[in-house]
Image (spheres, helix red, strand yellow):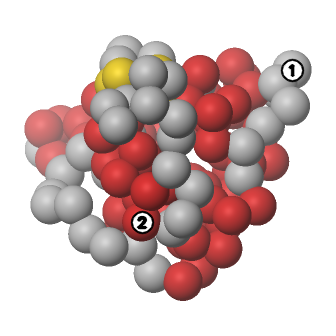
Amino acid sequence: MAKSNTPIILLVLVVATMLVATNASGCDNDINSLKETCLQFVGVDGPKLKPDQNCCNAIQRSDIPCVCTYLTPEVEKVISADKVVYVAQQCGRPLKPGSKCGSVVVHG
């Protein structure tokens, strides 16, 4: 039974870590907004999916480079930095080539 709860516990811990880490940041609202609207598109599990309009609206309002700085190795156990880069690009907010998002270096 503990195994079935492990992913949920890990997600709660990662989200709590993100919230604590972002309390002093300028993009904590962006992270919360993306977490609420884009998790299905940036989560580690599953294939890359084209984001829906709600997710793109959140991306358009967000400081994605700031959000990328909070994609630590622990957070990347739940949130795919590669998918964050993909979703940002799909929503018309591509990151600059050579920039870093979590463990991913953006290529041109």
Circle 2 sits on which residue? 90
Compare residues 48 and 8 and report the one nearer the observer: 48
Question: Sequence-wise, which precedes: disc 1 or disc 2?
Answer: 1
The structure residue drawn at horizontal position 76% and vertical position 61%, both measured from the top left corner, is 61
Compare residues 55 and 12 and report the one nearer the observer: 55
The structure residue drawn at horizontal position 63% and vertical position 42%, both measured from the top left corner, is 64
Which percent across, then down, holds residue 46?
15, 59
- 15, above or below 100, in the image: below
The numbered mark at residue 57 is none
Q: Is residue 85 left or right of residue 54?
A: left
Circle 1 sits on which residue? 24
* SS under mark 2: helix
Compare residues 18 and 26 and report the one nearer the observer: 26
Verify CB contact (< 8 Å) between mark 1 and mark 2. Answer: no
Q: Quadrant of residue 48?
A: bottom left
For badge 1, the amino acid type reads Ala
* SS under mark 1: loop
Evaluate whether residue 102 shows in this view.
Answer: no
Compare residues 96 and 72 and report the one nearer the observer: 96
Q: Quadrant of residue 55?
A: bottom right
- 108, above or below 40, in the image: above
Q: CA distance from mark 1 to mark 2?
A: 29 Å
Quarter of the image for the C terminus: give it.
Answer: top left
**Crowding at label 1, few (<14), some or many (≥20) Cα neighbours within 10 Å?**
few
Q: Is residue 62 left or right of residue 68?
A: right
The structure residue drawn at horizontal position 25% and vertical position 45%, both measured from the top left corner, is 44
For badge 2, the amino acid type reads Gln
**Crowding at label 2, few (<14), some or many (≥20) Cα neighbours within 10 Å?**
some
Quarter of the image for the N terminus: give it.
Answer: top left
Which percent across, then down, holds residue 102?
43, 23
Q: Is residue 20 left or right of residue 23?
A: left
